[in-house]
Image (tube, rainbow, N blue to C red):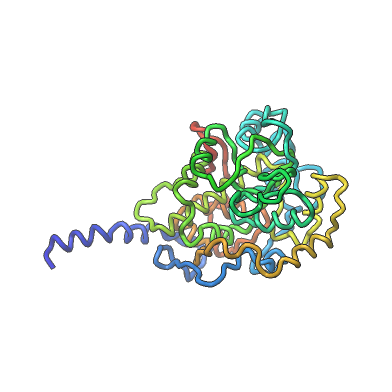
């Protein structure tokens, strides 16, 4: 082969080769160096079987997810008080060491109703918003609440949830919707243009619940075989938060999807911690149905639903709830995430442990012990970093 042809071939292959070398995490002294998964698009594949991420078995607790500690014993950076001991309720005057001004700045970029922060929306506020990341169990929770008689809708306005619901989308009680986490004025045009599949409302929500889920399972499901987010969704998300990648040169399509989804998990949850009034793990839904009963009582003090009712509702769904919506991305591990973006992987581990999820000692990154700082940038976008 002529020398010129060899040079062309080398130029084509060099970016992927460099990325595969520099993106791999370097094990520390307390990390096992023989973990099987490796960074690189070729070692990832779409799951040809049905995606089991939203099996009811998961919500019944029959899964591989390890819950390190009950969430009611969680010691986080947020100021928590009041309410049922089964839920964590934030103080309205400033969460996670935010000043009152910083707290109100976050509230105004959210859907929380707060006269104190001049965040009242248009018209009478709705009662309930459950939000979090995509694939955190939003369809599951929508179905549970609807079976309890609450008029709530999912974020997907094209999924049939608006039909037959009092109030349309959102319902006259509220919604379970991941895109509703943010609602800043500067980014609404992007949502209108690029997020036509979901609804928007000028109303705010009196009760906001942050629903969290194990990060590895969420990222595996949400990245959808390396196809998420689409270009339009990414444009809206990167207007609200720093979800775009830095140093993605040579990174394959699937790796980029995983890295963006990891940022989505970190940024949506940290913002939710500052603006939601309560936090719950979706994995606790059936093991602690009192959590969901408490949500019902917050909306309606005369709620008659019992914990047994909630368990019966969940059991009645059968094995699957929303398993055909996405294709699970294979090989999502802490080592892979660290190879793609070590800082965000460290932040994801830190948050996961705060939420009570287990991170094995041999996979724990030194970055998870660093201080994490989240807030708005000069361009009014939500971001986080370690120091």
Total tally of numbered discs in the picture: 0
Residue extending farthest to the front is 164
Residue 229 visible in the current orientation = yes
Q: Is residue 271 left or right of residue 241?
A: right
Query: Where, by quadrant of the figure, is residue 91 drawn?
Result: top right
- Measuring from the top left, give residue 247's x and y in whole percent: 39, 48
The residue sitting at 56% across, 65% down in the picture is 362
* Quadrant of residue 96 within the rendered picture: top right
Where, quadrant-wise, is the N terminus in this rendering?
bottom left
Judge from the rendering whether residue 325 lies leftward or rightward of residue 303; answer left or right.
left
Question: Which of the two residues, 212 or 167, is positioned nearer the viewer here?
Answer: 167
Observer-nearest of 150 and 31:
150
Residue found at the far left of this picture: 2
Front-most of residues 312 and 378: 312
Left or right: 54 as drawn, with respect to 298: left
Q: Residue at x 75, y 41 (%)?
A: 127
Q: Is residue 342 visible?
A: no
Q: Position of residue 275 (x, y in %)?
A: 67, 39
Residue for point 71% across, 43% down? 167
Q: Residue 15 at what x, y percent from top left? A: 31, 56
Please tell me whether residue 375 is drawn above or below residue 43 in the rendered image. above
From the viewer's perspective, is 185 left or right of 309? left
Please say if 52 is above or below 153. Answer: below
């Amino acid at each position: 082969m002529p020398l010129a042809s060899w040079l062309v071939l080398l130029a084509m292959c060099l970016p992927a080769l460099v990325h595969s070398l520099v993106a791999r995490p370097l094990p520390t002294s307390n990390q096992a160096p023989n973990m099987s998964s490796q960074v690189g698009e070729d070692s990832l594949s779409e799951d040809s079987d049905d995606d089991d991420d939203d099996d009811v078995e998961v919500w019944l607790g029959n899964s591989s997810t390890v819950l390190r500690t009950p969430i009611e014993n969680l010691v986080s950076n947020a100021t928590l008080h009041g309410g049922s001991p089964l839920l964590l309720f934030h103080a309205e005057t400033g969460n996670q060491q935010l000043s009152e001004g910083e707290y109100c700045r976050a509230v105004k970029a959210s859907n929380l109703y707060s006269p104190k922060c001049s965040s009242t929306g248009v018209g009478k506020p709705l009662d309930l918003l459950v939000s979090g990341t995509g694939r955190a169990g939003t369809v599951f929770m929508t179905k549970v609440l609807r079976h309890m008689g609450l008029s709530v809708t999912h974020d997907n306005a094209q999924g049939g949830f608006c039909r037959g619901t009092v109030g349309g989308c959102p319902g006259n009680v509220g919604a379970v919707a991941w895109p509703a986490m943010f609602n800043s004025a500067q980014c609404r045009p992007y949502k209108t243009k690029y997020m036509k599949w979901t609804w928007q409302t000028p109303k705010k929500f009196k009760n906001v619940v942050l629903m969290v889920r194990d990060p590895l399972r969420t990222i595996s499901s949400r990245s959808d075989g390396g196809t998420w987010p689409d270009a339009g969704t990414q444009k809206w998300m990167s207007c609200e938060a720093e979800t775009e990648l830095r140093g993605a040169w040579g990174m394959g399509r699937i790796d980029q999807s995983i890295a963006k989804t990891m940022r989505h998990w970190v940024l949506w949850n940290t913002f939710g911690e500052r603006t939601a009034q309560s936090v719950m793990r979706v994995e606790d839904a059936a093991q602690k149905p009192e959590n969901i009963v408490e949500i019902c009582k917050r909306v309606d003090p005369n709620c008659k639903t019992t914990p047994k009712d909630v368990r019966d509702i969940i059991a009645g769904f059968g094995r699957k709830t929303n398993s055909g919506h996405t294709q699970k991305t294979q090989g999502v591990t802490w080592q892979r995430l660290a190879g793609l973006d070590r800082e965000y992987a460290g932040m994801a581990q830190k948050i996961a442990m705060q939420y009570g999820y287990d991170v094995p000692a041999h996979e724990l990154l030194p970055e998870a012990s660093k201080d994490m700082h989240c807030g708005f940038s000069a361009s009014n976008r939500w971001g986080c970093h370690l120091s």
